[in-house]
Image (cartoon, rainbow, N blue to C red):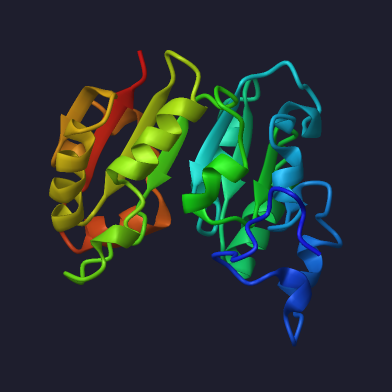
Amino acid sequence: MHTQDTPKNSRINLTRNLPRPNQYTLALDGEFKNHAFNEERTPLNKGKWSQVFADPSLPIDLEVGTGAGYFFKHRALKHPERNLVGIEIKYKPLIQTIRRTLVAGAKNAVISRFHAFDLPLMFETGEINNVFVHFPDPWTSPKKPKNRFVQQRNLDILFELQKPGSFLEFKTDSLVYFEWALEEIKQSRYKVEFLTFDLHQSEKAADNFVTGFEKIFINQGIKINYVLLRKE
């Protein structure tokens, strides 16, 4: 049975319908149930995300696509004065993310298995603050740009979901994706606060947390593209 807010034609398979559960799918609704939400429980928190945290008075930030969760853990530990929600579709990195973060002692982080294009089903208008989008799938095939997360449709959605004064941070190794995204950003309501085609040679380098993906790209001599957007 679908919840009221869960799309009938879900973009991702429902966990309960998986023919062969594994340790990660079982952990999502078992060991980490209070800190990890499947695709059916996630929409139930819409407008009420503050209540899932130990301190509901703190602002709520979002990471879109946590991967294995190294930045997620870093962010949660570095900023205990803020709550953090992560979304990730793949079970293994999702569980790795929340396990790694909780073991490190963070008490201000939760994660959801949800599709990034369905954020209006997850949050109310003005419910979230800062957003981080690091190394999403670049979808470099000419037929696939509609699948890229940083596009005008999703930028419009995020702008509505964020509180005024919040920022959106996007970085990628894909110059093709980045240049394409900049054209999308021009059509959005965000203000470009900082932009560079070489993050590690910029003034933002000192404060940048180097993700696992980033280390691989750096070792290959690939420059990291970065833009910081602000909702005024």
Residue at image position (68%, 61%) is 95
Quick check: 19 left or right of 191? Answer: right
Where residue 41 sits: x, y (%)? 77, 52
Q: Is 69 located above or below residue 23 in the figure? A: above
- Left or right of 230: which side holds 80? right
Asked if residue 14 can be seen in this view, the reply is yes
Q: Identify whether 129 is placed above or below 46.
A: above
Q: Which x, y percent locates residue 33? A: 83, 54
Pick whichever, 59 or 186, lies toward us: 186
Report the residue at 62% width, 23% height from top.
82
Question: In the drawing, does residue 216 fall left or right of residue 68?
Answer: left
How many marks on residues? Answer: 0
Compare residues 208 and 127 and report the one nearer the observer. 127
Q: Return the x and y of residue 141 as percentages of the image width and height.
A: 20, 72
**Residue depicted at 50% across the width and 18% down the height:** 163
Name the residue furthest right. Answer: 30
Quadrant for the N terminus in the image:
bottom right
146 above or below 21? Answer: above
Let me know if residue 65 appears in the view.
Answer: no
Outermost residue to the bottom: 19
Q: Give the quarter of the figure containing the C terminus.
A: top left
Which of the 4 image quarters holds residue 104?
top right
Give the x, y percent position of residue 204: 26, 28
Q: Is residue 59 above or below residue 131?
A: above
Residue at left 69%, top 69%? 14
